[in-house]
Image: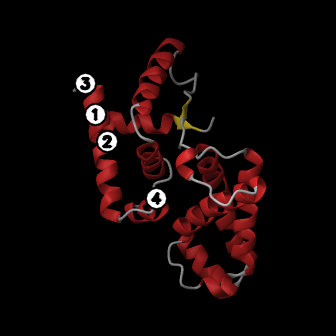
Amino acid sequence: MNTDKMWRSFLKNGDNHSFSILYNSHIDKLYSYGIHLGFQKETCKDAIQDVFFKLYTSRESLTQIDNISAYLFKSFKNRLVDIVRKNTNTQIVELVNQPFSLDITILDNIIDAEEAILLKNKVEKLLKSLTAQQREAVYLRYMHELSYDEISELLNIKAESARKLISRTIRKLREQTGPHLSKAQLMLTFPLITIL
């Protein structure tokens, strides 16, 4: 479903159906992203509600937004930081101090137990070799299928830098896995990345 099309429909008509589709298509992705950034479950839930409330009540002032997914991810991340600031009465919250983390799970009914443990350990080792920014970029690209422009906006880097970051990360992962994994096989390991 094209969320940008639903966004334009919501802007034009203000209909609840389009808004509901936008909400339902993003809620799990945003929640997962917030958990991976290291925020508490309740904080993520509150931030999601705040972002969508603002979206609903301020739609007339948000007509310049072309890519709603990128806007939602960025607004959500900013709202999480604002909530933590407010709750801790701290003036500065550094996301660097909250490293992007990933945990690996494998469906037992797809792979037998021994292979699952071996694969999980390999992928965890690979992910631990990456920086927090590399893990976040790969997560956004391959789990949420965000474009390089969207990733660059979220990570506050240039689009070309996002492209290079992901390319170098994939190259690094391939070097660590050796010649026995093709690029396609390497890409198949990314769906193994899930929420804690």
Q: Which residue is mark 1?
A: 174
Image position, residue 71 (x, y; %): 56, 69
Amino acid at the residue labelled 2: Ile
| Residue 30 appears anywhere in the view | yes
Three-letter amino acid code of the residue under disc 3:
His
Q: Position of residue 60 (x, y in %)?
A: 67, 87
The residue under the point 41% across, 45% down is: 134
Which residue sits furthest left?
179
The residue under the point 32% across, 34% down is: 173
Spatial CA span between label 1 and label 2: 6 Å
Q: Amino acid at mark 1?
A: Arg
Q: Position of residue 40 (x, y in %)?
A: 72, 45
First in sequence, mark 1 or 3: give its number.
1
The alpha-carbon separation of the residues under discs 4 and 3 comes to: 32 Å
**Badge 2 or badge 4: first in the primary sequence:** 4
Q: Secondary structure at mark 3?
A: loop
Q: In screen coordinates, is 135 left or right of 62?
A: left
Q: Quadrant of residue 23?
A: bottom right
Q: Determine which residue is flagged by label 4.
A: 155
Which quadrant of the figure contains the N terminus? bottom right
Q: Which residue is mark 2?
A: 170
Inspect this view and state whether residue 2 appears.
Answer: no
User: Does dot 1 land on a helix, a strand or a loop?
Assistant: helix
Q: Which color scheme does this rendered protein use?
A: secondary structure
Q: Secondary structure at mark 4?
A: helix
Decide if residue 71 is on the left or right side of residue 149.
right
The correct choice, above or below, for 36 with respect to 173 in the image is: below
N-terminal of the two: label 2 or label 3? Answer: 2
Contact? badges 1 and 2 (CB < 8 Å): yes
